[in-house]
Image: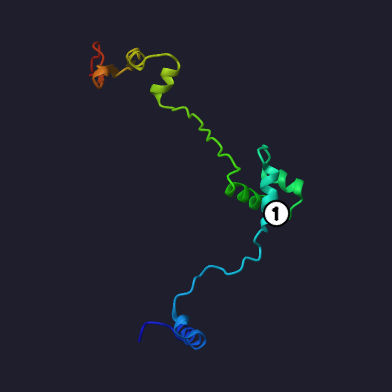
Amino acid sequence: MYNTTRKTVRKWLIRYRKYVLEGLNNKSRLRQKYPQKMPEDIRQSIIDTKGNRPWGARRIKEILSLSYSHQTIHKKLKQAGKVKKKKKRYKIRKNMSPKDILKEKNKNIDEYILNIPPIISDNYIIELENIKKGGYLWCRPPTDFAPKT
């Protein structure tokens, strides 16, 4: 009928019998009781102990001999505004590109590439030309090369 389960309909019926129309309103899903909630006097003693001292939650836990975890104590200090935000330290990574490596060695990449000698073999010569304009790679036979007959 309304795309609901029997369990939901029974729950509505029980609520209606107990609270009449008020029982059919949506109920809050928040917990009504917090059995582990820290008492206000302990929370205040944590904040007072911290004061302006550079003590952390672990030291305060040890001093006051509390049974709560250091994370809980830290959370209470943070809620009270007693925790300073740490500055993020960024590691400067070295870029390992050839251009940056050469800059590190105080060399100009264009000078470096232009000073590469040609590769000479028995059958060909490989040369770099016009590197500054985009570069060409030439592979040509040597001038004194004569094909074998």
- Horizontal and vertical percent position of residue 9: 45, 85
Label 1 neighbour load within 10 Å: few <14, some 14-19, many 20+: few
Q: In this view, does 34 lie to the left or right of 111?
A: right
At horizontal 25% and vertical 10% (from top left) the residue drawn is 144
Q: Is residue 134 above or below residue 1?
A: above
Quarter of the figure with residue 67:
bottom right
- In front here: 93 or 110? 93
At horizontal 75% and vertical 49% (from top left) the residue drawn is 64
Q: Is residue 149 left or right of residue 60?
A: left
Whether residue 147 appears in this view of the structure is yes
Q: Is residue 50 above or below residue 36?
A: above
- Horizontal and vertical percent position of residue 121: 33, 17
Q: Is residue 9 left or right of residue 34?
A: left
Residue annotated with mark 1: 42
Element at badge 1?
helix
Outermost residue, top side: 144
- Horizontal and vertical percent position of residue 82: 61, 43
- In front here: 138 or 28? 28
Q: Is residue 103 above or below residue 76?
A: above
At horizontal 49% and vertical 29% (from top left) the residue drawn is 92
- In front here: 93 or 144? 93
Which image quadrant: the N terminus? bottom left
Q: In this view, does 125 lie to the left or right of 29?
A: left
